[in-house]
Amino acid sequence: MNIEKVLFGFFVLLALTLNFGFVMGDIDDPDHHHVYELFAALVVSLVATVLKFGDRSHIGAVLLATSLVADLHLLAAAAVWGTANHITGTGSDPGTVASVVSLAGGALLANLASVVLLVIETANLRR
């Protein structure tokens, strides 16, 4: 068993599941979406992105692209939440939370695409 591939798969799947956990719930209810869960999803997504830099194949490039898209969405979600809470002072009103969750939903789709590609690549491996 290759520990590098295990860690790679672990972080890719963890990025998806943390993102899914954050998005689940009423889209505009701040009680259903915790800022630390968004932070954890962002950090794990960034780690997964770093792990994807080594692959020079075409599928590796597509995996990296999906990860970069997820990172961009999660960074934008964190920026919207941070701006609302610390700059404009509107706090976690339903409109802000809906925007944050919508951006995290885009990251969820990118992470899902990444996992699907990883499963397809794994299924195509020949021994």
Image (tube, rainbow, N blue to C red):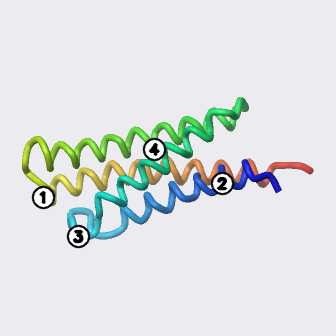
Q: Residues within 10 Å of mark 1 (few under 14, many from 20)?
A: some
What is the C-alpha distance between the residues marked 1 and 4? 24 Å
Contact check, label 1 and label 2, Cβ < 8 Å:
no
Earlier residue among tags 2 and 3: 2
Tag 4 or tag 1, which sits nearer the N-term?
A: 4
Q: Which mark is residue 70?
A: 4
Q: Residue at x 58, y 37 (%)?
A: 64
Which residue reaches farthest front?
A: 3
Identified by mark 3, the residue type is Asp
Decide: is 73 above or below 98: above
Please report whichever mark, 4 or 2, sits nearer to the chain's N-terminal start: 2
Q: Nearer the viewer, mark 3 or mark 4?
A: 3
Q: Say the numbered circle drawn on residue 93.
A: 1
Residue bearing the label numbered 3: 31
Q: Where residue 97 appears, x then y in whole percent?
A: 21, 57
Q: Indicate left or right for 79 with 44 as reference.
A: left
Q: Which residue is mark 2?
A: 9
Residue 116 numbered tag:
none
Which circle, 1 or 2, is nearer the viewer?
A: 2
Q: Secondary structure at mark 2?
A: helix
Q: Is residue 26 left or right of residue 110?
A: left
Is 32 situated above or below 8?
below
Q: Secondary structure at mark 3?
A: helix
Q: Where's residue 1, x and y in %? A: 83, 57
- Badge 4 crowding class, 10 Å Cα cut-off, few under 14, some 14 to 19, many 20 or more, is many
